[in-house]
Amino acid sequence: MTTPDVDELRRRLRALGYLDAGVDRFVLAPARASRGPAALAALASVRVGVLAALLLGPAAAIGLGARLPGLVTGVRDAAVLAVYLGVLFGAAMAGVSLAVSFIVRAIFRSPAALAGVRARRFAFAAGALVTIAALAYLTLWWRTANAGFGWRAPAATALALVVAVAISLLLGHAVRIATLGVLAAAAPAAAGPRAMKHSWTLNVAAGALAFAGAAVLLVWAAPAEPVAARPPLTVVPTGLHVRVIAIDGVDSAILQQLADGGRLPSLAAAIAKSRAALAPEDTRDPARAWTTVATGTLPDVHGVASLETRRVAGVRGRLAAASGGTADVIRAATDLLRLTRPAVVSREQRRVKTIWEAAADAGLRTAVVNWWASWPAPPDSGIVVTDRAILRLERGGALDAEIAPASLYTTLRAAWPSLRERARAQAAGAFDAIADRETQTVLTRSAELDATLAGIAAALPGPPRDLDVLYLPGLDIAQHTLLAATEPAAAAPSVIAARLDALRSYYVFVDRLVTPIAAPAEGELVMLVTEPGRVERPGPGTLAAAGRTVAPAHAVEAAAVDVAPTVLHALGVPLSRELAGHAVLAFFDGSFAARYPIRFVATYGPPSSTNESRRGQPLDQEMIDRLRSLGYVR
């Protein structure tokens, strides 16, 4: 290729008005006389794609982070997502530009057609469609990113729409100029469609029209209900210290049978005075089920859809794992390509506050041990010993927000050897009467886990708290290992019967384990919550209350979403109108109900977006391995 070749084509393009603006020169920089229209179309489209990647990638990353809480945890995650999405949008825009160029070139073949008005109008229409599509996307992105506030923040919204208009017009212009440049290169010398010259007045008018259209779209797409501001939570002290004991894997019929037989004195006392049957629900995924209990909202609201999620390569945040045939195929494909990898659900996916977070916001002292999706622990929600705390205590090293406040880690780490030894001692010998060694090993493993968690709860430092929450998963783990993992046809009836008897002995162990905390002292309210665990056919759960202010109640029906409002009402915290459940007022005597009527606030607001110290190495793979060993993930 010679310099005159380059100069000749550039002179033609400049004479036709294509190299006057900087964007034009960037898009048509690959123009060479030795290159055909197809080559110029491909190279110019790549440059249009680069523009789209630089302009849309960061905007899309911010919008996606706002749409999927937990995916973006910092600047690094945002930058990685911007690169991914920039490549995606860049490739898409390059494809659109190339397709438009080829279509126009195929339609307008003759020299007269190449230089005609119709070719120019076709290219203009293609650029206008790109402008409209980009503007609609960016406008809806702004609506998502600002949580629906829209024109209630006029300055920020106006600035965002101005930027959106500028980006959209620039991308539309780039597609149009690439198409016209290709037509000019295909035309004979001195021919080709001339670029349309726009005055500043016309450009400003186009921008104003686009701005008005985006503003109308923003108003039209605004949510019908305004976003409620978070009000202050005023507590009316009830004088009660509430303790919640959550036991997973409990069959209500077996619990009642053993309680009636005198084998569960502590649990029998806990359910004797006031008890409600929780409506059967799908509890096969413990993270989803117990987050519903802790938040008083349904999964589509609280956001924890499943225990297993996906992590995008290079991003610390997580994507909730969808279910279904198509989702399974996509998940397998992205895992195979190393774009995603399995991860465990975290607090960052949860969009609603739990009972301990709402109570802590109201100024109460709280503590929670081992609840699902409690990691990473926030620094402003009382004592939080997350579902990853045992892993950190076992392995040591710097915290990755497994425990809050961070100072508690030092205390628990020092006590860890004695806590583990005491747990082993409690589990040792508890199942010696079971002949089958495999079954005995399963029960002992679960017993050591539950005893460790109960020991951690007992080791928490003072002062006395208003709310203590403990989750015990051992019975569900044992039940799933002994029964659900075995095909009924593969086991003899005598084997199944022996395993059921072994599970009954675990109920007795749990009863002894919770004896120190199940009986309410003066001024205490103990609430027992059970769910049937990972069973295929939904069964009823149990919500029971014991304490001085509890009224006798037995023929009571409730749901999992009623647990949170009942606990919060007992603490004197106003109930959010966003809660799906209701306080079980039948649990409280007339004096309590008269003195403490239910109060409401519009919302508790979103959970805290800050985390406790995260200097340590994340225990992601260790958590997956542990859950796999316990039968939670495959």
Image (cartoon, helix red, strand yellow):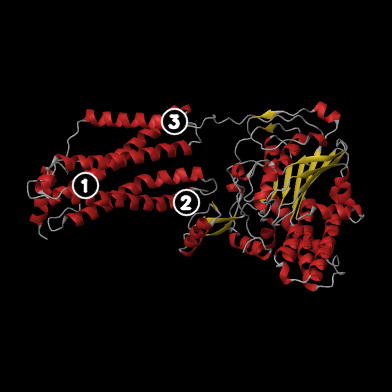
Residue 399: where, in percent of width, then height?
63, 55
Q: Nearer the viewer, residue 551 or 70?
A: 551
Evaluate whether residue 461 shows in this view: no
> Looking at the picture, which amino acid does disc 3 mark?
Trp
Please tell me in which quadrant of the rendered image residue 523 appears. top right
Disc 3/disc 1 C-alpha distance (Å): 33 Å
Query: For the point 39% across and 30% down, which residue is it?
Result: 215
Please tell me in which quadrant of the rendered image residue 462 appears. top right
In the displayed structure, 103 sits above or below 482; it is above
Mark 3, residue position? 220
- Badge number at residue 80: none
Q: Are marks 2 and 1 in contact (CB under 8 Å)?
A: no
Mark 2 or mark 1, which is nearer to you?
Answer: 1
Mark 1, residue position? 179
Q: Residues within 10 Å of mark 3 (few under 14, many from 20)?
A: few
Please tell me in which quadrant of the rendered image residue 420 appears. bottom right
